[in-house]
Amino acid sequence: MGKENIKIIILKYLQTTNVHPTGNEIYNELNKLQYIDEKEFQAALFDLEDNGRISYTLSTDNLKHYDIRLYRHHHFICDDCGAVRDIFIRDGALQMLIDHAQRSINSFGKITKVNLSFQGRCHNCKTQFSYPPDWPPPNNE
Ligand SMILES: [Zn+2]
Ligand SMILES: [Zn+2]
């Protein structure tokens, strides 16, 4: 299978999952269906990353967790296993946070990009993580 075809099946696979798999996880999953050369796979994954077709989050396991969702969203990252899940914060709430942060940094600089993630423990890991009582915030969109 050529690199271009591998790119297509990587993109298709990422569209079907919201677990933000690592490169190894993607490779193992796709390789179950048909044999893929590991070097070609790595080259295809790198190309997609390089061309901005996919993004990644560096998790607490120090691995890149890949994401096909390029629109603005945030992540919950498990401290124990490094699992990554999406968090969607409504624009109004996010803007309030950005305004607040901008006010405190006004004399020093201007915020142009927000890189926000939340950490805790996923339910698969032993210690239970509990959300604050008012979670999730009401969604008025
Ligand atoms: Zn976990
Ligand atoms: Zn994501």
Image (cartoon, rainbow, N blue to C red):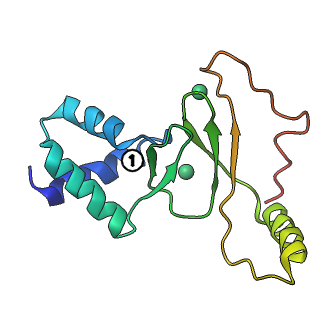
Q: Quadrant of the C terminus?
A: bottom right
Residue 7 in view here: no
Which residue type does callout 1 highlight? Leu
Q: Which residue is mark 1?
A: 14
Q: Is residue 67 above or below residue 78?
A: below
Q: Is residue 135 left or right of residue 47?
A: right
Residue 128 x, y percent position in the rendering: 73, 20
Residue depicted at 35% across the width and 35% down the height: 25
Q: Residues within 10 Å of mark 1 (few under 14, many from 20)?
A: some
Q: Work out whether residue 104 or residue 52 is closer to the camera in this orientation and state it.
A: 104
Q: Is residue 130 above or below residue 46?
A: above
Residue 37 x, y percent position in the rendering: 12, 43
Residue depicted at 90% across the width and 76% down the height: 103
Q: For mark 1, give the secondary structure.
A: helix
The quadrant where ligand 1 appears is: top right
Residue 128 in view here: yes
Classify residue 50 by image quadrant. bottom left
Q: Work out whether residue 12 or residue 72 is closer to the camera in this orientation and state it.
A: 72
Classify residue 134 by image quadrant. top right
Number of marks:
1
